[in-house]
Image: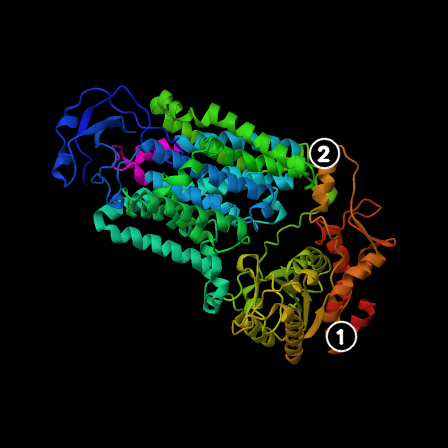
Amino acid sequence: MHTLGKRHKKKTGRDKVFFADDDEKCEPESVCRTACSACQITPFARQPGVSGNGRCVTLLTGYTEHRPEKGLRLRPSCGMMRGMESTDRKAYLEHVNGLRGLAIAAVVLYHLQAAWCPCGYFGVDVFLVLTGYLMFLRGDRREGYGTWLHRKLWRINPPWMVAGLLTVLVSMLTMVPERLMPVLGSFGSAALGVSNEYTARSGGYFEPATQENPLMHLWYVGVTLQIYLILPLIDGARRRLGAWLWWLVAVLSLALGVVVNYREEVPWLMQHGRELKDLFPPYYSIATRLWEPMAACGALLLPAWEGRRSLRAGLSLFGLLLLIVPMWLSETGSPCVYPAVAGSLLLLRYGDTGPVRWLLSLRPLQAAGRISFSLYLVHWPVMALWRYLRFNQTTAWEHAGMVALSLLLAAALYTAVEKRCGGWQKLLGRRAACCMLGAMAAAAALWGLMSAFPSISRWLPGSCGDDVTEGSHPILTLRLPDADLQGFPHKVFRKRPRPLGNNTDVPVSFMLLGDSHCWHLCYGLDALCRERGTLRGMALNSSCVPAWNCYLERDNGDAQFSREYGEQLLAWLGSQMHIHTVVIADFWNLRLSDNTIRDWNMRRIPREQARAAIIAGIVEFCRRLRARGKRVIVLRDTPFFPGDKTPLDTWQRRRLLGLPEELPALSRGEWQALRERNEDLFRALQAEGFDIPDPAPVLLDGDEYRLRTRAGRFLYRDSNHLSRPGSLRVAEWLLPLLKAPENAEKAGN
């Protein structure tokens, strides 16, 4: 390890920050004003072109260090920092702070209205680059890994814990229990450092449960904590084994991110990359994010061109364009994150020159940069809770109010917590580690307590009790006997078939296949089969649309029907002679709208031909089932309520806020108009002679389809899934169809 000149062995009386980590503010250096022998007798004189003039600065470690005057090159203290020169550090860190302000502005705009900045979430990528860059910029640390990590925890944990705890308390008073549990999950998992994995596995980013979670954004805290854990260890291994290890890990992380994020563009990866996507969720996994802070050292390796200011100014302008243009002009989900990261690296290296320096030093950007972490922590809870209480109907004036309230709370959080939490560690002394671990354990325990004892939620203001809504379906934990699954292709299907009925003296005679509209029938069929004991079946809820020669994928890879799925399922069903009926239940209104599919040779099917291909594939699959001696029943859609995806949640919110209760209802004519969208599928199936019973008449309440009957029973748990009473109604109607084929016409009518 090289040294940066002669280091004094005594602490100075001035402790102003010189190099800043990502969560520490970019303050100017503290210059030693007293005489120093190192300023006259300098080891830098041995380097070509370096004079003996210099100055002393105070590092974060508390020791002073000699540095030459402006414009002179140093021998770097870290092998990853070769080529870094000592320029005016105040300007250097000022433009870094401005870049931080630009990044948080993009994130806030994206969350406020995605159309205003379609790829504003690239600002998070800039934050991760800054995390690595400012870690490398510190150079040679005079503290151990444990001490450094403890200090970082005290810098990052108190702000998000305070913001998170206040958000949890407000959510307990304003949210219904079903929406509160994801909030507690994000809070507790952030304390464990795995909030990114929790968010990735708790639903899609644009699902209501995720968008209405005011602590969803804490996934970034999980990624940051993991970077603090992993990156110093990789750097330690690099020092022992060489720089090649560093670049190898960075390249592997980058390649993994490309594979799991954009594998749909490569046919081979579409077929074989699913396991990687499960292990490393796109956008959230540290394995796919690690390359960004590691790439930050690339900014330190770029040539300085100190004497060529016009070239530096041109490169900084180019970097600004590479960052801003993808944010504002690309579509959401665009792979333009890579040029945006490259632009941020150019800005870090050359942004202290020319008009870009003036732009990044503007007071609004500097102020936003100073409170960027606090603003990130408070802006999403403000927006999510505001929209939740306003039923997602906000005006332009309310958008301005969200921004103003976010800035006010961020300034308060920065002043009261973020700016002071470093001093709290020193004040607590040896008790600091115990206090931090205790706070993290308490946050995780709150999540665990609510998960282990869900009955606690009954005492919350927003709870109306599951005995009222009857929306939750008990998890079917019983397993089918191995004899019923002999030869079943477990390696192909991720989910084990569920038993329907428990009388093992009766053979399995029917199979239910489909997506969540298969799942919501399981409760009713299982209850009736158990009660009567004369029938037993199984349900394979693999979220698939059984369309032959159509490769469909949804829900992070769970909803898939490939050649391997289709051929092995048919082969297994053909060998199960006791299964005489296959029921297919899918949400056809959603599944037939899929416009990004491929055939089984991974050739993309044009969008205008996708619907016809899916219909032809479903008909072909049913033909092949019938050729193996199976009776095929394809259920029509159960009536659903367009518009609000969570009408029951909206009803509970209105009760909590004292507003008039409103629940959706459909007339027969309105439902007939909605079901016309999918008549082309059912006409094609009828032409082949397949049974297509309609469950809609069973759910009529008078002359309307209602989410809650006039008698007060809820038939639905959301806009299209049945509650327990609704599932029992449809199962009572469906059961005669499953007993004997000759009853099909009678039950269908």
- Picture quadrant where residue 618 is located: bottom right
Is 58 contained in the magenta span?
no
Residue 311 appears in view: yes
**Percent coordinates x, y for residue 198 in the rendering:** 50, 46
How far apart in space, not on screen, are marks 2 and 1 (Cα)? 48 Å
- Picture quadrant where residue 236 is located: top left
Residue 686's label in the rendered image is 1
**Percent coordinates x, y for residue 648 in the rendering:** 72, 44
Residue 672 or residue 279, whichever sits in front: 672
The residue where tag 2 is placed is 656
Q: Quadrant of the C terminus?
A: bottom right
Residue 146 or residue 467, whichever sits in front: 146
Q: Quadrant of the N terminus?
A: top left
Would residue 424 appear left or right of 409 to someone viewing this image? left
- Residue at left offset 51%, top offset 33%: 375
Would residue 369 appear left or right of 517 to someone viewing this image? left
Would residue 541 appear left or right of 684 to someone viewing this image? left
Dot 1: element: helix
In this picture, which residue range is highlighted in magenta? 136-153
Residue 442 appears in view: no
| Residue type marked 2 | Leu
**Percent coordinates x, y for residue 59 in the rendering:** 28, 29
Dot 1 crowding, Cα within 10 Å, few <14, some 14–19, many 20+: few
Dot 2: element: helix
Residue 530 or residue 49, whichever sits in front: 49
Figure check: 633 above or below 169: below
Question: Which SS does the magenta portion mostly show?
Answer: helix
Is 138 contained in the magenta span?
yes
